Image (cartoon, helix red, strand yellow):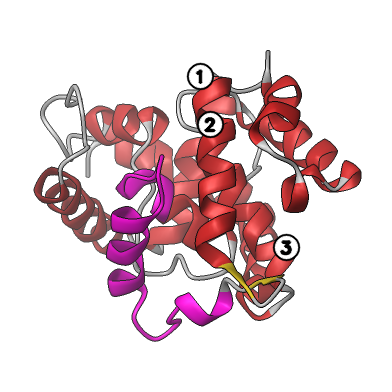
Amino acid sequence: MKRSWRRLILEYKARKDQIKKRLEEFKPLHKGKDEEIFSELCFCILTANANALHCADAIKELKETGLLYKGDESAIRPKLKGRARFHNKKADFVVLARKLFYDGGCIKVKDRINARDTLGTRDWLVENIKGYGYKEASHFLRNIGLGRKIAILDRHILKNLKRCGVINEVPSSVGSRKTYLDIEEKMRDFAKKIKIPLEDLDLLFWSIETGFVFK
C-alpha cells in the first residue's frame, strides 16, 4: 500500500467520529422545511470560487433579514460583497433560483428532489440552476443528506486525489459532465480500495486541507 494511502487511513481513524457526526447532521435536511433546503441551495451558489465560511455568514444574514426569500438583486448584492466572488452575478443567480421554485406564494424545492435518484436530480439541478455545475449540485445534495453516491470535486479534493495517485494531474476544469463523472468514478473506486465510504472520503480530504470539518 502506498505511503500516502496509509497516512490517509490514519487520518480517517483520527477524524472518523467527527466526520460521521457531521454526515448524520446532513441526513434529515432533505425532508425538512423548503426554506432551509433553499438556503443550502443558495449557499452552494455562493461557494463557487469563494470561502465557505464567508458564504455561510452571508446566507445567515440573508435569512435573518428575510432577503433570501423576498429581497431583490439590489438588496442582496451588498450582503454578498466581500464574502462571495462575483457577488453581483451571484445575487442574480439567487433571485433566479427563487423564481424557479416559487409556487403559489411559497418556495417549494422538495418537489424537484428525488431522493431515490440522486444522479438524475443532480443532472436536473445542473441544467436548471444558474451558477450550478456538477460540483455545486453535488455539494448541495450532500449538504441535504443525499451525498452517499456522489463526490464534490473542488480544488481540495482534486489536489488530494492527485497526491494519492488516483488522477495524474489536476484538470484545469471539471466543468464538463464527462470529465466530472470520469474523476468521480475513479474516486469511487479508490474509496472502495481503502475501505472509506465515498462521502466520508470527501469530507476527510476537505478537512485535511482546511483543518476542520464544515460542509
The residue labelled by disc 1 is 86
Q: Who comes first in sequence, dot 3 or dot 1?
A: 3
Q: Is residue 156 visible?
A: yes
Question: Label 1 amino acid?
Answer: Phe
The residue labelled by disc 2 is 90
- The span picked out in magenta is 110-137
Residue beneath the point at 60% across and 24% down: 51
Question: Label 2 amino acid?
Answer: Lys
Q: Nearer the viewer, residue 153 or 134?
A: 134
Which residue is situated farthest in the right direction here? 64
Which residue is situated farthest in the bottom direction here? 116
- Tell which tag, 3 or 1, sits nearer the viewer: 1
Q: Who comes first in sequence, dot 2 or dot 3?
A: 3
Q: Secondary structure at mark 2?
A: helix
Residue 101 appears in which quarter of the rendering? bottom right
Which residue is situated farthest in the top direction here? 82
Measure the alpha-carbon separation of dots 2 and 1: 6 Å
Q: Is residue 25 visible?
A: no
Q: Secondary structure at mark 3?
A: helix
Question: Label 3 amino acid?
Answer: Glu
Measure the alpha-carbon separation of dots 3 and 1: 24 Å
Residue beneath the point at 75% across and 30% down: 75
Side of 178 relative to 204 (left or right): left
Give percent across and percent down for residue 22.
67, 58
Q: Quadrant of the N terminus?
A: top left
Q: Which numbered dot is residue 36? A: 3
Q: Nearer the viewer, residue 87 or 47?
A: 87
Q: Crowding at label 2, few (<14), some or many (≥20) Cα neighbours within 10 Å? A: many
Give percent across and percent down for residue 201.
42, 51
Measure the alpha-carbon separation of dots 2 and 3: 19 Å
Q: Crowding at label 3, few (<14), some or many (≥20) Cα neighbours within 10 Å? A: some
The answer to if 213 sits in the magenta stretch is no
